[in-house]
Amino acid sequence: MALKILIIHESRVISKIIQDYLFTDHPDAQIDHIDVPAFPEKTILTLEKTYDLVFSGMEMKGYTGLDIKNILQGSSANSHTPLIIMTPTDTPGYRKRLMQNGVKYILPIPCTSTRFRQLIYKIFNPAPVTGHTLYAIPDSRVVIFNNDKKIPGKIIDISTDSITCKIEDYLPKELEKAQKAIVQFPADYGKASTISISGDLAGFKDLFLLNESSSRSSKITWKIKWNLFELHAATKKTLQLYLGRVPVSSFELLKYLEKFNKNKSRSHESKIDILSAENKVLHEQISKLRKKISELENVSPDVTLKDVSLSALMNEIPEPSDDGFKLSIFKKVIEDNIKIRSEML
């Protein structure tokens, strides 16, 4: 049965994060939102739907999480609905004060997907446990290919050489003739990275018809030869590992991933070294330019040019000329210059 969940918060960003976490583990969940402070108290008091779980912010304009708790307890439909208070303040003293006010479940914001999942598990599995705790995870999905037809299913069991699935509403003959399977699931539920493993169905192994009143289901097992492992990261980069016909062990896979990460790290370090070297050269050039500017700033404005050839002040390269007109002009310029200087003395 699909979970019915209510989120009460003034931040749409936080509401969206909680919704994404919930849909990752519970894709069929029915999620409603109430924006704060733009809702009257009677909105909750008159709700006819009984929710399985309610999320509420603690520090909101107009209402606190404790206000929401009291309103829920006064309603007819959700007086016993579990309430999770979301708060950015996560100190022992603050948690103690909330618990003294009757708050049982507290979720720090931001939070990891693991912590979120542990809290949800604790709410729906209240019995105390000892030793290792197994957390409920969403069904792993598979797509079976029979020619151009795609047949969705749930994975019951998966190993290095076989796969067992639960298939709904398909004839046994269609399933027995399937050629390929692709398994896809999040690398860490709630994150953007996903893992895909594809393989060739090497032969039909077993078929068992499940007697379920709601639908016609089959539990079917194939022998499989895995051939491709893909890790799709949020950066759009894809790691591909061709498995071949020999099943790869988890140890070998982890070793490969470790090597891949080391190579990637070395590549980044090499790029950083190159950038550091370029940065050093640029700093040296800047230092030289600053020194030249400083020297020019200390030069007197009345400085005279000494031993500077006329060609250094011209764009054109000087060439000898026998043109009498040019020689006369040049001679006149020199005579006028001498005359002006003599008058200044």
Image: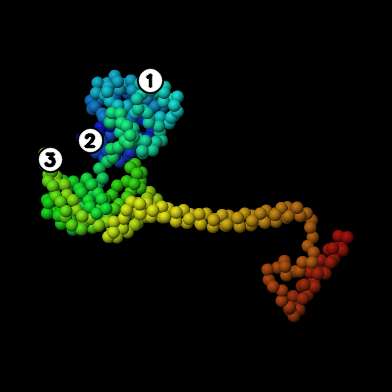
Badge 1 vs badge 2, beta-carbon distance below 8 Å: no
Residue 243 x %, y %: 31, 58
Residue 40 x %, y %: 32, 23
Residue 207 shown left or right of residue 158 in the figure: left
Q: State which mark lies toward you, 2 or 3.
A: 3
Which tag, 1 or 2, sits closer to the chain's start? 2
On-image quarter of the C terminus: bottom right
Give amino acid for label 2: Ala
Give amino acid for label 1: Asn
Residue on which disc 1 sits: 101
Give the residue drawn at x 27%, y 60%.
Answer: 245
Q: Secondary structure at mark 3?
A: loop
On-image quarter of the N terminus: top left
Which tag, 2 or 3, sits closer to the chain's start? 2
- On residue 2, the disc is 2
Give the residue drawn at x 20%, y 49%.
Answer: 164
Q: Secondary structure at mark 1?
A: loop
Badge 3 vs badge 1, beta-carbon distance below 8 Å: no
Give the residue drawn at x 39%, y 53%.
Answer: 255
Crowd around label 2: few <14 · some 14–19 · many ≥20 (10 Å): few
Give the Cα separation between the discs numbered 1 and 2: 31 Å
Q: State which mark lies toward you, 3 or 1.
A: 3
Give the Cα separation between the discs numbered 2 and 3: 19 Å
Viewer-proximal residue, 158 or 214?
158
- On residue 212, the disc is 3
Give amino acid for label 3: Glu
